[in-house]
Amino acid sequence: MVHKKLHDWYAKNGRKDLPWRNTNDPYHIYISEVMLQQTQVKTVLERYYFQFLEKFPSLEVLSHADLDEVLKMWEGLGYYTRAKNLHKTAQITQPKLPETYEALLELPGIGKNTASAICAFAYKQNLAVMEANVKRILCRIHVLKNPKEEALRELALKMLDCENPYDYNQAIMDIGATICKVKNPICDECPFSLICKAYKEKNFLYPEKKRKIVPTREVNIVVRHHNKKLYLKQRKGRFLHGLWGFEEVDEVSVDAEFLTDVEQKYTHFKLEAKVYVLHVEDHQDLYLSLDKIDQVALSGVDKKILAYFLTDNRV
Ligand code: SF4
């Protein structure tokens, strides 16, 4: 009964025109899944999915690309480890992704959710997709505050329509995105309302929200410039590895001028930067022209700093 309602709902309301739903190409589906992990559909559609596939039309092309080029195409999407893992996975698997859940799980950056999604959507296998919106629906239907991931996965599998897993998975994702929203779910339109315990209780606080205390990291950043060129370097450490950025310093030179305060939120901390500008008389190779800066991948915070610097007409 619920499956029938769900398929009827999907036939009428599903987002069937999304490009990754109109392809069987596992590579295209894989790229969309990775991009959508932390980013809204609209942003992925407008700025990243087509552009990325145009530049890297196959796993093979991606595997031969420079990491810098991949990071440049990822610029602004954040969570850059995703781009690096895509690149590594392409190098390991090209010309073709493996076709089993277990083999996909062995690859860099492919966890259970991504492996399930690739198997379900590219290979039409009986696996339940478990992205964040789907988890919220499962928690509400079964009034679960703090479920373990594995318990949720079992529930998801039990609810899966094994006759038509593809449409079932797409439908539940769409319901999560458009009906069972975090605030004010539209239960009257929801095919799950028949079985949903949260709906019966009229209490939608499932799953429980965990309060995260995010530490703040304070830094000083200096933009050194000389003759229309700026000093940037490529990060070598784990954080934002491979992206280019301005220099972080412990001590700010007395000759530097304060430019602005900049904030950037990351998963595990908030960065608060005091940004200074320093005109130098001499420069070396690492000073890049604005054209060159346009070609390298900058992190979000460095993009903001560059914009302030240019608005301030320092060059
Ligand atoms: S009935 Fe309401 S709370 Fe339950 S799954 Fe549907 S939209 Fe979400």
Image (cartoon, rainbow, N blue to C red):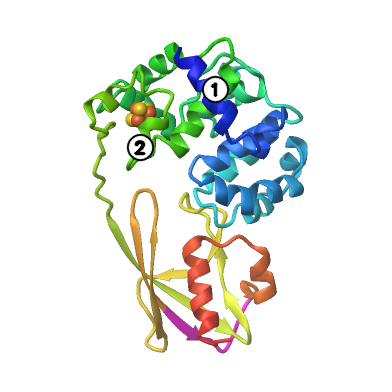
In-image side of 138 versus 244 (left or right): left
In the rendered image of this protein, does residue 34 appear above or below residue 199? Answer: below
Q: For numbered disc 1, what is the local secondary structure? A: helix
Ligand 1's quadrant is top left
Residue at image mark 2: 185
Quarter of the image with the C terminus in it = bottom right
Nearest the eye: 25 or 263: 25
Nearest the eye: 195 or 46: 195
At 64% from the left and 70% from the top, the residue drawn is 293
Residue 164: give x, y in percent of width and height.
Answer: 59, 15
Label 2 vs 1, first from the N-terminus: 1
> Is residue 205 visible to the viewer in this orientation of the structure?
yes
At 58% from the left and 22% from the top, the residue drawn is 167
Q: For numbered disc 2, what is the local secondary structure? A: loop
Q: Are marks 2 and 1 in contact (CB under 8 Å)?
A: no
Question: Which quadrant would residue 155 be assigned to in this image?
Answer: top left
Residue 89: give x, y in percent of width and height.
Answer: 64, 34
The span shown in magenta is: 276-284
Q: Type of residue at label 1?
A: Asp
In front: label 2 or label 1: 1
The label shown at residue 279 is none
Residue 168: give x, y in percent of width and height.
Answer: 54, 21
Q: CA distance from mark 2 to mark 1?
A: 19 Å
> How many tags in the picture?
2
Residue 206: give x, y in percent of width and height.
Answer: 28, 31
Disc 1: CA contacts within 10 A as few (<14), some (14-19) or many (>=20): some
Q: Is residue 216 magenta?
A: no
In-image side of 256 versus 114 (left or right): left
Q: Type of residue at label 2?
A: Pro
At 48% from the left and 73% from the top, the residue drawn is 305
Disc 2: CA contacts within 10 A as few (<14), some (14-19) or many (>=20): some
Ligand 1 lies under 8 Å from the Cβ of mark 2:
yes
